[in-house]
Each structure stands twice: as C-alpha cells, then as structure tokens.
Image: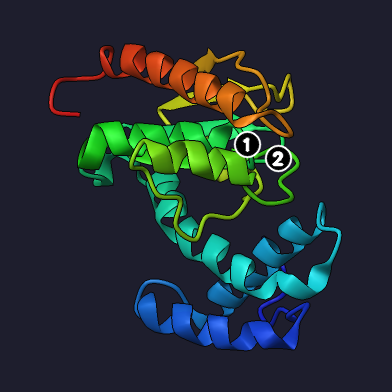
Amino acid sequence: MTASSHPVLPDERLAAGVARLAVRHQGRYSVETVQRLIADSYEQLAANAHVRTHLVVPAERFAAERPDVLAHVENPTAGDGRPRVLSVCSHNADRSQPAAALLAHRAGDGVIVSSAGTHASGAVAPQVVQALTEADIALDDVHPKPLTDEVVQAAAIVTTMGCGDACPVFPGHRYLDWPVPDPDGTPIAVVREIRDALDTRITALLDTLPSGS
C-alpha cells in the first residue's frame, strides 16, 4: 500500500466508510492511511468478484479488520499473548469459514481466529450455514476475504484446506494441512460429516495450545 498521500477511492461510496474508520482510529492512523487501506481492500475483493457494485460494505468490513493485524505484525509482543489461528481455503466460502467459526466457538476468547481465501469470492453456502446453525454456531455478517501477507504473518498457526501452494509460507509459523472435502454443492448430510471432521481436527489443535487458550 505505497500509494500517493492522497489515494483515489475506486468507488465514491467508500468515502463514508473512510470517515467511520478514521474516527475509530483517530490518533493511530491518518485519514490518508485509512483511505489507502479501504481502497486496497476494495481492489483485492474486486480481483475475484463477478460484480463490483456490491463490494462497498464488504470492503469496509475487510478494511476494519486489517489495522489490528498490521499492528500485530509491526509489534508482535504488544498483544495479549493469545495465539492467532488463520484458516485458509480457496474461496473462503465453504471450508475455512466453518473451520474458523467452529474454532472460535470452541476456544472462546482464548484464541484470535480469522479466515481468508487465496481467491476469495462468492458467499458461504446455505448448507454450510445450516450445518453450523444446527451446532448452535451462527455465521453473522461473514464474507469471503482475500488472503494477505500481513494476515499470514500475524498468525501463529495457519490451517490450510485445498489451497495447495497458494498460501505464502513464512518462517516461524506452524502450518497444518486439513484435507477435508469441499462442501460446495453437496447434500446437507455430507456437510454435517465435513463439519464433524473439522471439529475433530479442532479438538486435536486445541489440545496442543497452551492451557487457558
């Protein structure tokens, strides 16, 4: 994000989001930095979007998550010590979203959980939402998010599902490949099996984290 000091927004409707985030981060980031962050978030989402007209709200949500990640990358020791776990799949719509939701549900506040896609696009499949709802897990306001270098750098543990070699690898991070099937287009009974398989892997992961996580 090494744009000029006065970046141009790719959609004028993003200006309202810039104003909101600038107020939230007043004294921490300048308006120009926030504007670059939102513009960059929009363009990354647009790279795999079929329709650009519906990206304003997701771009603001995506941008809103990034300052905390960037701050952790800049100063890893400044956090509260909780492990950060990132779940990655191709589209961040069918496997990494439920993996992150299940982990967040199981770990509570003990783990900082995020998810992303190497080619983020689409929306979480209805049958995935249903399978998680049956487990009393709500996917509220989730949207596919692109994989960025900073979110990988911030994570202590990265779980990958079907994204091959597309996920960047940084030294000092723990990578776990979870070869679960893609639930896209499968019957709800199969999605439940995938949900339970993810939950089993999450149980094993939680057993390796420090007590209190």
The percent position of residue 209, horizontal first and vertical second, equals: 26, 19
Query: In this orientation, does residue 149 appear?
Result: no
Q: Secondary structure at mark 2?
A: loop
Q: Is residue 187 shown above or below 16?
A: above
The amino acid type, in three-letter code, at marker 1 is Asp
Q: Quadrant of the C terminus?
A: top left
The amino acid type, in three-letter code, at marker 2 is His
| Residue 75 placement: quadrant | top left
The percent position of residue 104, horizontal first and vertical second, equals: 34, 38
Which residue position holds label 1?
A: 94
Q: Quadrant of the N terminus?
A: bottom right
Q: Secondary structure at mark 1?
A: loop
x 42%, y 43%: residue: 133
The percent position of residue 47, horizontal first and vertical second, equals: 82, 55
Which residue position holds label 2?
A: 91
Which is nearer the eye, 115 or 141?
141
Circle 2 Cα neighbour tier, 10 Å, few/some/many (<14 / 14–19 / ≥20): many
Cα separation, mark 2 vs mark 1, equals 7 Å
x 73%, y 88%: residue: 12
Circle 1 Cα neighbour tier, 10 Å, few/some/many (<14 / 14–19 / ≥20): many
Question: Does the residue at mark 2 contact the one at mark 1 (Cβ under 8 Å)?
Answer: yes
| Residue 41 placement: quadrant | bottom right
x 37%, y 43%: residue: 137
Q: Is residue 166 left or right of residue 15?
A: right
Q: Is residue 7 left or right of residue 112?
A: right
Query: In this orientation, does residue 31 appear?
Result: yes
